[in-house]
Amino acid sequence: MSTSDKNKKPTIKDVAALAGVSAMTVTRALQPNSSISEKTKTKVLWAVKALNYKPNISARRLSSSRSYFVGLLYIKPDGSYVGEFIIDALKASRKHGFHLISEEYSSSGGMSPLYLVDKLIEDTNLDAVILIPPLCDDLELLHHLKHKEMPFVRVSPNVELTLSPFVCINDYDAAYEMTQFLINQGHTQIAFIQGASSLKNSLSRQQGFLDAMQANELSVPAEFIQPGNFTYQSGFSAAHNLFELTNRPTAIFAANDDMASATIACAHKFGITVPDDLSVVGFDNTYIAKQMWPALTTVEQPLDLISDKVLELIAHHDLSSDGETLQKFELPFKLIERDSVRNLKTVPSS
Amino acid sequence: MSTSDKNKKPTIKDVAALAGVSAMTVTRALQPNSSISEKTKTKVLWAVKALNYKPNISARRLSSSRSYFVGLLYIKPDGSYVGEFIIDALKASRKHGFHLISEEYSSSGGMSPLYLVDKLIEDTNLDAVILIPPLCDDLELLHHLKHKEMPFVRVSPNVELTLSPFVCINDYDAAYEMTQFLINQGHTQIAFIQGASSLKNSLSRQQGFLDAMQANELSVPAEFIQPGNFTYQSGFSAAHNLFELTNRPTAIFAANDDMASATIACAHKFGITVPDDLSVVGFDNTYIAKQMWPALTTVEQPLDLISDKVLELIAHHDLSSDGETLQKFELPFKLIERDSVRNLKTVPSS
DNA sequence: CTGAAAGCGCTTACAG
DNA sequence: CTGAAAGCGCTTACAG
């Protein structure tokens, strides 16, 4: 039995034969923007479907100028975001007929990261590059790629928004909704731990928080807004400051999960019980959100949809950019309710 | 400038020309176990090096029976291990001229995971499969692959050790060393939280702990050995049991990081300060080890070396197995010292 | 042990 | 709008 030689995979010739056209025409039907009549195109696509034909990427790559390689650049992960992203990106790449090459953006062997990127591009002839946070905001890298005319897509960038297409979620809406959720649970004394101040999405999250509070006619004392920069460390000291206040908040909204996690750790240190004495929410829904005790209520970004959209943009050559018009693709977020928030309107369970 | 057309990548023809042989001979020099004289082989390899020639995987794939695709099967990650592993496996794959296809092993669309594996194998014509924990111990999958004669390599398997080559670290030695470390810090009352009892490496870790204790003439009360199964939950209740004891341990060795993390969370709950009142150590060095407070002292597995070894085995066709001889490749582990252990021989810092 | 020829499955010019 | 030919860079038989 082993691999059945009879049901060999259909090739372009099989499709051509079934559709009654030449191989060339099949190629045309499969490529966007090629001159082909609607009628033949329909016929060919029908045959493609009937045979369940999938183009052979290797053959395609060998004969075309495109490499069907796409590069994912990241910086040394200190959280699980990168790993989670790559898993989804790998899936999306396969679906769209690309191979994903992910590489750490760092110097090595005395060579600058920029030089290594050039080498990667030359070695593999990348069709496009994907940039995820925080690399998507690296001005030097951005302009280098631009200058080399290497197309790229970004995920949740904060700067130079017109420089490339990008996909993101609406941070403002998500933060607004999360704040409203807290308020609905009866919280009125809510503190906020900021993300890195230079980043637009930090500001959006903060603004969403602020506006939701204001819409509910709730005031936010100045000391309830604590600086942070998305790291565990910064979250820990922000929480520390908050806990030393004479009137503590009943809820803390941290601009990401790492800082929320640090807040909970710090609460433990102060003998503050979460969620009985204090509710904590985060943002991102990384693995850590599930691993901590209590499990964290947070905002989920649809990494699978994001990857899919990114690869779709690459596959369809939609990567040009005039540097002026905004090419923004916003995907839906989701509130994930877990155990780190107490409903003040009900009697405590303990 | 753009992409310089002059320095095109060298092809097999360039190498052949430089070495003064035919393309065929170059192929032979590059393939293991092919009939070629030492002399010509040396000459060709020199030319390969001189030109910095890298075979074109696509061309290779198109013309050969090998697909140069290797599949990595995993089950839905509830920690960051999978993501971390994939990042390294991706790097190693590229280095060895393979493309990594990673897929979740799960049912979907009403189809069994086994069926989906078959489909993956057929669709992509995988050369080999990589199985990581805990999938590497899935008997059904193991025998299915064996039956299909699909070669596979495993990482840290616990069962049917002769069924395939595998790479691992020495769990026994690592646990022994970690225990000795604790003892060197002055600890004598050390508890152990077990991994899943059916797994050999759980037992190895436990035995390493036990033997180190015995070698130091330290006794371990029965209640100091708590059952667990590698999940956060199980670690939490194990710690809970330990903390309710009248004479608590001064140190707890959890068989993995997730359970160690739960132990620390539980300690917080009991008002026990880590490391002042209690030292905690884990195993694996996953991201979570750095993210918690205090950061966890643990054992690191060299995921990069493991991936490299796995791909090397695949590349060199070393995947046969007679089902009887053990093909075990043991890589070095490392103790990572962080902040979760107190040295009882010095004055406490606080 | 070594080489000339054919072919893998596509796409790129080039014609019509 | 459509097709016949050539070629991408390798490897697989087949000879010698």
Image (cartoon, coloured by chain):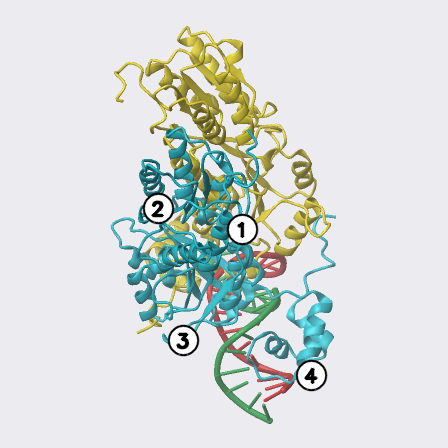
Chain colours: A yellow, B cyan, C red, D green
**Amino acid type of the residue that numbered disc 4 sits on in the rendered structure:** Lys
Mark number displayed over residue B335: 1
- Please, which chain is the residue tagged with disc 2 on? B
Task: Identify residue for label 4.
Answer: B39
Task: Identify residue for label 2.
Answer: B224
Q: Position of residue B68 (x, y in %)?
A: 49, 65
Q: Quadrant of residue A10?
A: bottom left
The answer to which of marks 1 and 4 sits earlier in the sequence is: 4
Between marks 2 and 1, how big is the CA–CA gap?
A: 23 Å
Label 3 packing within 10 angstroms: few (<14), some (14-19), many (20+): few
Q: Nearer the viewer, residue A175 or A254?
A: A254
Contact (Cβ within 8 Å) of mark 3 with mark 2: no
- Considering only vertical position in the picture, is A98 above or below B168? above
Under circle 3, the secondary element is loop
Contact (Cβ within 8 Å) of mark 2 with mark 1: no
The answer to which of marks 3 and 2 sits earlier in the sequence is: 2
Q: Nearer the viewer, residue B80 or D9?
A: B80
Q: Position of residue B251 (x, y in %)?
A: 44, 42
Contact (Cβ within 8 Å) of mark 1 with mark 4: no
**Amino acid type of the residue that numbered disc 2 sits on in the rendered structure:** Phe
**Amino acid type of the residue that numbered disc 3 sits on in the rendered structure:** Thr
